[in-house]
Image (cartoon, rainbow, N blue to C red):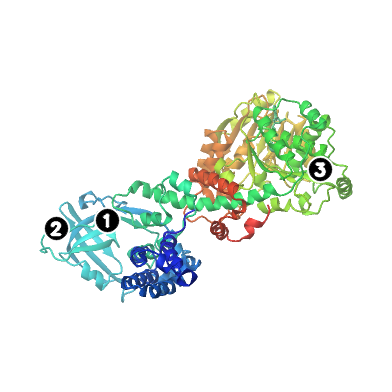
Amino acid sequence: MEGSPSQLALEAVLRPLEFAARDDYAQLDRVVDLAASLEQAADRASHGAVPVELRKAYRAVRDAFRKASKPGAERAAVERALTVLAPFARPEFAREALNQPPSVLPGLGPRRAELLAKRGIRSVEDLLYRLPASYDDRRHLDTIGSLQVGRHATFVARVLGSGFAGWRGRGGRGGRLFEAVVGDETGTVQLKWFRGTEALERTVAKGALLLVTGDVKRYRFSLELQHPEVELLQAEPDEGADPEVPRRIVPRYATPDGLHPRALRRAVAKAVADFSDLVPGRLPDALVQERSLPTPAEALRALHLPDLDADAVALSDARSPGHERLILEELYLLELGLALRRDRQARAPGLALQTQGPRLTAALRGLPFRLTGAQQRVWKEIAGDLARPHPMSRLLEGDVGSGKTVLAYLAAVAVAESGHQTALMAPTELLAEQHYRTLCSLAKGSALRIALLTSSVTTGHAEAIKADLAAGEVDLVVGTQALLQEPVGFRSRGLVVVDEQHRFGVKQRAALRGRETYRPHTLVMTATPIPRTLAMTLHGDLDLSVLDELPPGRQPVQTLLLRAGEGREVVRAIREATARGEQVYVVYPLVEESERLDLRSASESAERIASAFPDLRVDLVHGRLDAEARSAAMGRFERGETQLLVSTTVVEVGVDVPNATLMVIEHAERFGLAQLHQLRGRVGRGKKPGTCLLVARGASEGSEARLAAMLETTDGFTIAEADLRIRGPGEFLGTRQHGRLPDLRIADLLRDRRWLAVARETAHDTVRRDPGLERDPALREAVTLRWGEPLALSEVG
Ligand code: ADP
Ligand code: MG
């Protein structure tokens, strides 16, 4: 792995010095041409992009050897050089230098440094990594005649007249409006500064030729630029030949108010000139060569001070080689942290389970359906994990209805066959209850002993179940978080399954672990797929299985969007579905009428619907209903005793009633995209085609985009991408919930997905070759620094 250019240059100078000084200068005579070669090396090093002190030190070394042509003088020169360079040879030198406050840079006094600090720029390094938000391509000049409102423009023009336009408002210094009219052969335009200064007055004087850059605005019937940047090209018209116009690509930074863009640009340019060579590269050499990447130092220079022949489009789209290098650097450290964690988990001791036994064979044979190809593949992956003497940490992603439950069941049988127990956690009681019923019917063939433990189970009953668990009389306990909240003693917990993982926080996931001598196997299931590379990063400590095939015979759910006033369509759809003997969900966002929002409450609507369809049996399910009543209502719906279930979002996840074919979502505009997709997933689960009616009764932020996405596709992965686009990665990923990823300075998980995959592969490769990064302490330290706390790496799970 490469170090920083500064480190390499320093080594090139130090190595011969140290060799010469060895054994009390015994080697001095054996170094041929010492003075000449050191003079050269020091001279070369003194031109690097390193702090002035270091450049001075190199020059002192150079001069010392330049004078040391006489034989006896060499030793003195070596001694002097070693003394002069010693402070820079400390390993902390680069980091301390980069950590200095920006105020060490020219033009950034304490007041301006304060402004930058408010934007999170507290060090030279922060400044280096704050890349330009965009670039002005000043290689091509505009003409005044071609200026367009709303565009950023750069042009050369002569001042036709200028001056202060009297006192404005507050008056006093800095409160005066300064105006100028400038022109070229194609037209004239007005420039305005609300706080004109004397210096400006001197620059923008009649007759001066200026390079003007700024945003073009409309003022009444003409165009103007407010606070443009101007550069004086020629003070007087009669200075002879046309002046040379500097054609450059100029970086534009997000500049805090009170700081002139040019001042910030100068400071950054200085930071690049004095510090960029201190920035080390961490990527493996092979990757750097394969992709012909610049060093980070070169990348920073290319991005902050672009060459004349740079690709302006690539620069603006963050797709230049410089971007690629810095983004890969950042993502590599991110993925290394995850890979280290995962590697550690994978090597922790765990229970090796029986996955070929007769009970499992019977269970497989007794399934009411054939496993799909995807289910078979994933089962192999899970079984393979369970058989190894290390804890499984696996994420199972599968769209709604792809058949995840049966895999949890098979795993539980394998665990029971080896004499251990399984805990299955569901996000809601409703879902726990349903899983309990489903698993009980699956378990007939395998004699799996199953219990349900939720907060609604009566105390006495719960105590009995806990006693059975402790005694090993129960193989599989299905429950909600109540399972976590109080200590539940297992005789031997071998597997924890977390269903619908998106509902669980990371903390809760962590709480699942750690009481046993052996960490139990963990299977996390989710139906809210997130794009694959993102999933691999967010859950980088988990192995990933994907169920990418639905059971046979499924037909895509037909989705229709209705607006307020199209209620008759809803009535007709309900009539048609129930006439075919099928069942219907009607979902509302809230239980009770809120005074602020004119939402129709589910309870009110249940009554209305019941009276509208006097011949149908209608039930109501919502969060406030006690467990028994809710379970009874769900049971009636599952058995087909009721045809219409009016509910709040309690049916959102997991509920599985294949005879239900119509999903009506009221106030669809109020639901999130993932929620809408989950709700739609409640129908079309059997062989019969499903229909989903989205009833929009208004609009809310982003609602049209969400509804459009629902109409466009039924594929969970596509939906997830749309969700990510609409909400932006921050909110989508729930940074607060997932708060364990370090902040990214340059990379963007969404924009840079293809590089994320490269970074991930490389990181895994690195950890495979050097588990724990013992052979590369510098890299290990960089990862630790990036992840904030060393704990993040050492903590198992
Ligand atoms: P999800 O992945 O959404 O949790 P479930 O496990 O609830 O899906 O399964 C959805 C439905 O598909 C259930 O009714 C289940 O019995 C059925 N199912 C699962 N696997 C198959 C299969 N291989 N063939 C036919 N039906 C299946
Ligand atoms: Mg499920």
| Residue 181 drawn at (x, y percent) | 20, 61
Ranked by sequence position, the earlier of labels 3 and 1 is 1
The residue indicated by pointer 1 is 220
Which residue corresponds to the image point at 15% horizontal and 53% vertical from the top-left?
185
Element at badge 2? Answer: loop
Is 439 on the left-hand or right-hand side of 119? right
Disc 3 target residue: 421
Where's residue 57, x and y in %?
A: 38, 71
Q: Which marked residue is nearer to the observer: mark 2 or mark 1? A: 2
Quick one: 557 or 778, which is closer to the camera?
A: 778
Residue for badge 2: 242
Kind of residue at disc 1: Arg
Q: Can see residue 97?
A: no
Q: Amino acid at mark 3?
A: Gln
Do the numbered discs 3 and 2 sit on residues whose CB atoms are within 8 Å? no
Q: Secondary structure at mark 1?
A: loop
First in sequence: mark 2 vs mark 1: 1
Q: Secondary structure at mark 3?
A: strand
- Where residue 757 sits: x, y (%)? 52, 43
Above or below, 269 relative to 198: above
Q: Mark 3 packing: few (<14 Cα in 10 Å), some, or many (20+)?
A: many
| Quadrant hosting residue 111 | bottom left
Relative to residue 529, is residue 249 depicted above or below?
A: below
